[in-house]
Every structure is written in C-alpha cells, then in structure tokens.
Image (spheres, coloured by chain):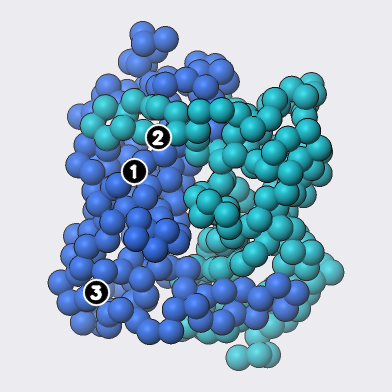
Chain colours: A blue, B cyan
Amino acid sequence: MSNSITAETSGSAGLLFASRISVEQVEEGFELAPKFDRDGLIACVTTDAMTRGVLMLGYMNREALELTLLTGEAHYWSRSRQVLWRKGSSSGLVQRVVEMRIDDDQDAVWLCVSLSSGIRSEPASCHVGYRSCFYRTVELKTGKLSFAENTKTFDPKSVYGDAPNPTLL
Amino acid sequence: MSNSITAETSGSAGLLFASRISVEQVEEGFELAPKFDRDGLIACVTTDAMTRGVLMLGYMNREALELTLLTGEAHYWSRSRQVLWRKGSSSGLVQRVVEMRIDDDQDAVWLCVSLSSGIRSEPASCHVGYRSCFYRTVELKTGKLSFAENTKTFDPKSVYGDAPNPTLL
C-alpha cells in the first residue's frame, strides 16, 4: 500500500500522511492516514507522562500535526484564536512528546507529553493556572462541580498579561 | 449564580446544566455549564481506571451527557450511525463511570471508567477488538505506525455480527 502515500499530502512534510483507501488499511495498517473533519481539524487528547492524567483536549490542523511529528513538541490549532499554536510559545509551558498514538479510525490523536516549567511557573498546561485543564470533577446525579486541583501552579496574569482569554461563552 | 440554572435546560434532567453567563462562572464556578458545538455535541475523552490509558475519544449530545450523569454508565452520540449510544448495549462492554471531570471552558468531558467484560470477550472498549481504540503508536519524524497492543481481546465478528463497521473513510 506504500504507493497510496502521495495523493493527500501537502506542505513540508508531504510524506507523513497517506490517503484513506480502505477500512482495513485505516484500522489495521501501518500508514498514518488521519481523518480531518470539515474544518480541517483532528481532535487530540494530551496526557501527562508524570501524573498520567489528562491535561487537555485540543485540535490540530494538518500543519499542527506535521509540526508535532517533526519537532517532537505539541502544536495545536487554536479554534478560539484561529491560529496555529505552538504550545508554550508565550508561556514557556512547552509539551515534549513522549509518545503519540492514533485511534482505530484515525480521527483522533493521543499525545503523552512531558511538561516543562514555564517562564514564571511550575510545569502546567492550563491557561487558568492549573496543571491540567480538567481541574474540576462533576458529581454524578447532581452535576455539581468541585475542585480536584486546589492550588494554581501559576498566576495567569503574570504569564499571559493582557492577552485575550481563549474561553468563549 | 444558582438562578442561572434554568434557561438552557431541557429534558428529564433539566436541573443538571446551567446557562453560560460569564468566563469567571465557566472557568472558576461550581455549575456544570457545558458548551455544545454547532452539532450539539461535546467531546469526551475516556480513560481506563485500571491501566490509566486512554480508551477512546467520543462525543456526547445533551441527552448522552445527562444519561451518563444519571445512570453512571457512559453514553455517547454515535456520529457515524447518528444515534444515541449506550456503550455496551450490543457488546456487553459497558463502561461504569469512576470519575467525571470537565475542562476549563467546559467544552470537553473526561470520563474515567471501569470496563466490564463483554458477552464474548475480556474487558475492552474498541470495536476492532482491542482494549483501547489507541492501539497503535505513531513514530515521530516518519509517521510510521506500530502496534502497541499485539493481541485482540475479542473477535469483532462474534460480538457485532454483521452490524456495519462504524469507521468512515
């Protein structure tokens, strides 16, 4: 199937992605043939190599996935800011890829990363200041939230200054 | 802020979801105020309480999220089949919620689950037969895939019979 690694390629890393030819190839094959959605994005769950918890759920466009593979540092597409986003470019909170996985139908990526300390912080991943973006638990039956992380690892104001908050209502 | 828990509610579990009023409420509050996308879905990453690895990345509509909270069993919205999907309804591979978390801007859910054995299988989560949907690693630089799980925990044919494969090209 190696001759299928041409049709859907683009950009600097043209040889990284294969065309999606068959269910068998996608599910049981050895070629990376990612499925980007109608916005050109693929979902990415990122876990912490140290705590083994989930840090964040982000999205990559083709370029972000290519750059992540080529540099070993997590890149995403920021949906709220609509820009390619090298994680840590403003905060210093870089994510170094320890392992990358792809799921059965290749429409989701799992990155296991090691976190670096930031310019003004302990290792963290969340713009609110916590290590993980998933810092709150949801109680079954009631839906009430409680904080699983009790202290922020950094002060967002001192790291991000007046940059717009990426959270959209 | 408790009086905001009415406007966006619907269905049997009307009291579970709050309206999204402010960034502060969404990021730092105690109310579950999920953000569903233009298709009415929220992303859900599901991890394995035993192995601590990522099992799958799925999507929930409002009803699936409500049912997951109320029953303690994972429900999803199948995008390929366009139906509400109680995980395990045909395979017996039920996911019991150990912990649910929500992320900073409340547009992603993290479920930590315990897997039950299926009708004809060991505990598993993936329709291809592996424990995790993320059974393949992606090599940095080259994008080549290799199998992190080497043996299937069940034979999909004996569990799903002739049901259509959910993988879309």
Q: Tags 1 and 2 in contact by the CB under 8 Å rule?
A: yes
Marked residue chain, label 3: A
Q: Position of residue B152 (x, y in %)?
A: 60, 29
Q: Position of residue A117 (x, y in %)?
A: 20, 68
- Residue for point 30% across, 47% down: A98
Q: Residues within 10 Å of mark 2 (few under 14, many from 20)?
A: many
Closer to the camera in the image, B14 or A56: A56
- Residue for point 78% across, 68% down: B70
Q: Tags 2 and 3 in contact by the CB under 8 Å rule?
A: no
Residue, far right: B12
CA gap between label 2 and label 3 equals: 29 Å
Q: Position of residue B49 (x, y in %)?
A: 58, 57
- Residue for point 27% across, 42% down: A68
Marks 1/2 same chain: no
Marked residue chain, label 1: A
CA gap between label 1 and label 2 equals: 7 Å
Give the residue at mark 2: B137
CA gap between label 3 and label 1 equals: 22 Å
Q: Amino acid at mark 1?
A: Glu
Q: Amino acid at mark 2?
A: Thr
Give the residue at mark 3: A122
Give the residue at mark 1: A99
SS category of the residue bearing label 3: loop
Q: Residues within 10 Å of mark 1 (few under 14, many from 20)?
A: some
- Res. B71 image quadrant: bottom right
- Answer with mark 3 or mark 1, whichever residue precedes in sequence: 1
- Residue for point 72% across, 67% down: B69
Closer to the camera in the image, A26 or B23: A26
SS category of the residue bearing label 2: strand
Q: Amino acid at mark 3?
A: Glu
